[in-house]
Image (cartoon, rainbow, N blue to C red):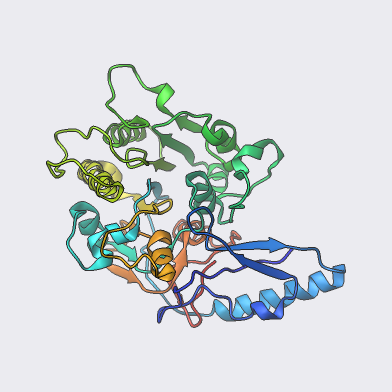
Amino acid sequence: MLLVLFGLGGAALASGTVVYNSVANYRALNMLTLSPAYFSPIHAFFISLDSNEELLESERSASADFEIMNIPLNVVAVSPAAAEYNVIVVMLESVRASMIGLYTGGQSRTPNLDAFAKRHIHARNFYANTNFTVKAETAIWCGMMDHNAKPPLSKYSDQLSLNCLPKLLREKGYSTRFYHGYQSDFYSRDRFLPKVGFNFQYFHEDEVPGETRRIGWGIADEAMYSLMLNDLYTVAPPFFAHITTLSSHYPFKWEWPSTAPLPVNSGQTLFENYQRAVQYEDYAFGQFWDTFQRSPLAENTIVVVTADHGVWTFANDIDMSKQVLLDEQFFRMPLMIYHPGVTEPVEIEQVSSQLDIAPTLAEMLGLSGESFVGKNMLAAVEQPWAL
C-alpha cells in the first residue's frame, strides 16, 4: 500500500501545504472529495499494485520524497529532563480553533485557553484528520488515519496489532492512563484501550455515586479533571495520561453550573449553545490548569491541549456558500503544549495535523528512533507538509 497525503481545500498557506506535491506520480492513488459534514474533506482509497517490484519502487520513491520534505531548517530547543517527563494529553470535545480568541484575533470567549497558548507552545495551522472522537484519539496516539467512512478501528480491537505511543511508553515503564466521563463500551473503548497501550481506564461507571457533578452525557469536565489529578498524584512517575472531555458534546444545551462565567441568557440557536459549551470548556480547563500549576506535577509534566473535531454550525455572519471557509473552520483545531523546559512562548506556523502529535511527543521524550507517519512539529522543514 502507499502512504496517502490529503489536502484540505483552502489550506494551502504561506506556512505550508497539506497537498502532496508528488501525488500525480502515483497512479495507484485515487482521492475523492466528500461532504465535510460527515467525512474528512479528502478520503483516500487504496488499490493493489501490479507487482512486488512496482510496490518496492513506489515505496522507494515515496521515501525519497519524504527525506527531501523533512530536511530540517531549525528545531525548537527543548531542555533535556533530569528524569523522564510525564505527559498529560487534554483532548477537548468539539472545540474548533475558530472559537478561541488567539486564533481569530477577535473577541475572546476563552480567556484561560488564550492565556495558556500565549505563554507556551501553540500551533497556528493545525488540523483534525476526522470528525469522530475515537478516530481522533487513534490519530493522536498512533499517528495513523482511521477510515472515515467505516466503523472505527476500535470496533476491531481483537484483530489489531498497533504500535502506538502509549504502548511504546508502557514498554519503557510508564503508567498509561485514560479518563473519560462517558461509558466504557462506547465504540468498544474498553477493548481498544489495552490494544493501544493503556493499563488504566476511568469512565463514568467508575464514579462514586453522589460525589461527582454530571452535565449532559456524563461526568462534568470539572469533576473529571479533579478525578484525574487526584489519581495522578498517587501514581509513581513516569506516566502518560489522556483525558477526553465530554461536557461540550452536541447538542450543547445543558444545565451549566452557576459557578461558570457564562452569559445569563440561554442560547436560542445551535451556534449560541455551542458558544456556551466552549465557554464552559474554557472555564473547566482553567480550573484544572490553576490546580496543576500549584502541584508538583508542573515541574516534570508535559501538557498537550488540543481538540478532536469541529462542529457544523457557524456564526450568522459567515458566508455559507463558501465551502472552503466552512471546511477551514470545521477542521482547524487548537494545539497548545506546555513543556517545563521551554521558558519562552513558541508559535509553530508550519501546517500540521493530529498525526504529528505522537512523533512530536516521541522526540520530546527521547524516543526519536520510533517510526510514526507524521513529523516532529518542532522541527521546521524546507517544504512544510501534513497528512
* Viewport quadrant of the C terminus: bottom right
Q: Residue at x 43, y 22 (%)?
A: 205
Residue 45: x %, y % from top left? 68, 62
Q: Nearer the viewer, residue 9 or 54?
A: 9
Q: Indicate the position of residue 355 as horizontal and vertical percent values.
A: 52, 59
Residue at horizontal 52 percent and vertical 63 percent from the top = 41
Q: Is residue 170 above or below residue 181?
A: below
Residue farthest to the left, as pictured: 264
Q: Position of residue 5 (x, y in %)?
A: 59, 69
Q: Is residue 355 visible?
A: yes
Residue 167 position within the rendered picture, expressed as x and y whole percent measured from the top left: 57, 44
Q: Nearer the viewer, residue 219 or 253?
A: 253
User: Could you tell me which residue is drawn at 46 percent across and 57 percent down?
Assistant: 361
- Position of 56 with respect to 287 (left or right) is right
Up/down of 47 relative to 226, above or below: below
Q: Nearer the viewer, residue 32 or 228?
A: 32
Between residue 161 and residue 214, name the one nearer to us: 214
